[in-house]
Image: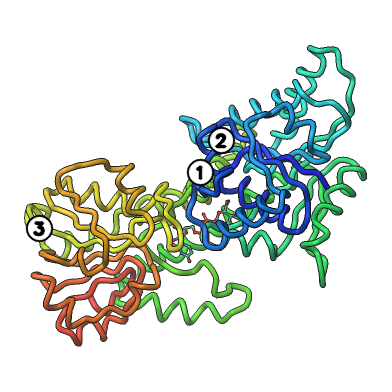
Amino acid sequence: MRVTIFGTGYVGLVTGTCLADVGHDVVCVDIDRAKVDGLNQGVIPIYEPGLEPMVKANHAADRLHFTTDAATAVGHGDVIFIAVGTPPDEDGSADLKYVLAVARTIGRHLGGPTVIVNKSTVPVGTADKVRAAIAEELAARGADIAFEVASNPEFLKEGDAVNDCMRPDRIVIGAGSAVAVDKLKRLYAPFNRNHERIVVMDVRSAELTKYAANAMLATKISFMNEIANIAEKVGADVEMVRQGIGSDPRIGWHFIYPGAGYGGSCFPKDVQALERTAHQFGYRAELLGAVESVNDRQKGHLFELIERHYGNQAALRDKTFAVWGLAFKPNTDDMREASSRRLLQQLWDAGAKVRAYDPEAGHEAQRVFGERDGLELCDSANAALVGADALVVVTEWKQFRSPDFERLRAALADRVIFDGRNLYHPDEVEAAELAYYGIGRGRSV
Ligand code: UGA
């Protein structure tokens, strides 16, 4: 099938590439010329394992095209996806200006009956707004063309996006007609082998499904962070508690890892946006508000542990902290809403210095923080330790999992590790005569 995708960000680029990989003829369109030129030369704007060779192979096979020419792109697609960003507005609602701008572009160029599919994470009711924007543009040029707006939310995770896209748990299709459902079923048939993954529903339910999924996952994390904080107070170890509850299939092992708080481009924004949507419809979503405020507090928790160890903030002045991990999670260079940002700011505010290392997010950190006093971006985990007083682990990259603790003891003047992702066992660290602070590990603090 011929597919057009507006937006070559995370969702658009991965979706376009996977659809091309199963044989569809895909055109990805973006207003950012530099990005499009780069993609045409095989330069991938994001770090995502496995994506680069797939983009290159499908581009070379002439199934994956990148363009800024919206008119031609609209003419190409039997199905047109909208996969542009929905950043938070000032009040936390999702800002639809990019989605609606694309809708207008589609309306200006549409030449024949087409299904337009929202893949961006958009509040309930957005399909209606997209439909109205397209209809307005069609009316302005006196065109009478049948079109339908469907919802097909994306559930991919950064760092594992290609795999999620090629082997989805489920494919949610929200549509109002059999024509649209059939078209999308045909499009996704290559991903729907062996057992049924397609769930068909109405458009509004599909729109809400996306938010419900992310809000549920964020809730699990905040819940576990709350239990971790209680564990710390009562002298229990949340890692034991996690193992004690995860084996119950009703709870499950996933997303019950306590830590330095959730970040990224999705959970913080989506929990807030769902809360706003509820509010706009006259409902106060208390649980969502709590999920958000627990997370906000959790992002400051590592610094609280640091303060606790040193007795007070003044004692942090001129200390140097080695920080391992800046990205909001491993296998990505993305630092949006990353817990590291809060921690670094708090350390700087207290007059401390930071020597940071992240396997992929170094350049992003440079962009975010610029040249500034108190920050040294290092090119290895060991380099970050040079001259450091203490180590803080913020992101659980695999390469941080088994450090040489003897070496750490020799390197860290104050002999202390703050482990924001519970990577280490307290006994192991303490056996090397290093003080250890984890998240929710009450027995050791
Ligand atoms: C998330 C969802 O997991 C995807 O299903 C969804 O499609 C995506 O948002 C989206 O809406 O686009 P992502 O933001 O890439 O994916 O990252 P996650 O792996 O979900 O991690 C989010 C944050 O939660 C990270 O900061 C991570 O460190 C934190 N986390 C995750 C925990 O603190 N504990 C856990 O147990 C799991």
119 sits left or right of 43 in the view = right
**Residue 76: % across, % down:** 79, 36
Query: Quick check: marks 1 and 3 in contact, CB under 8 Å?
Result: no
* Label 2 CA crowd tier, 10 Å (few <14, some 14–19, many 20+): many
Please tell me the numbered disc located at residue 319. 3
Query: Quick check: marks 2 and 1 in contact, CB under 8 Å?
Result: yes
Please tell me the numbered disc located at residue 269. 1
Question: What amino acid type is highlighted by mark number 2?
Answer: Ala
Q: Quadrant of the C terminus?
A: bottom left
Going 63% across and 62% down the picture, which residue do you hit?
Answer: 164
State the SS at label 1: helix
Question: What amino acid type is highlighted by mark number 3?
Answer: Lys
Toward the viewer: 37 or 427?
A: 37
State the SS at label 2: loop
Which mark sits nearer the N-terminus, 2 or 1?
Answer: 2
Instruction: Give the spatial CA distance, label 2 vs label 1.
Output: 8 Å
Instruction: Give the spatial CA distance, label 1 vs label 3.
Output: 34 Å
Which mark sits nearer the N-terminus, 2 or 3?
Answer: 2
Colour treatment of the image: rainbow
Q: Which residue is mark 2?
A: 94
Going 14% across and 66% down the picture, which residue do you hit?
Answer: 386
Question: What amino acid type is highlighted by mark number 1?
Answer: Lys
Going 78% across and 56% down the picture, which residue do you hit?
Answer: 23
Q: Is residue 372 above or below residue 217?
A: above
**Does the beta carbon at disc 1 come under 8 Å from ligand 1?**
no
**Residue 195: % across, % down:** 82, 70
Instruction: Give the spatial CA distance, label 2 vs label 3.
Output: 40 Å
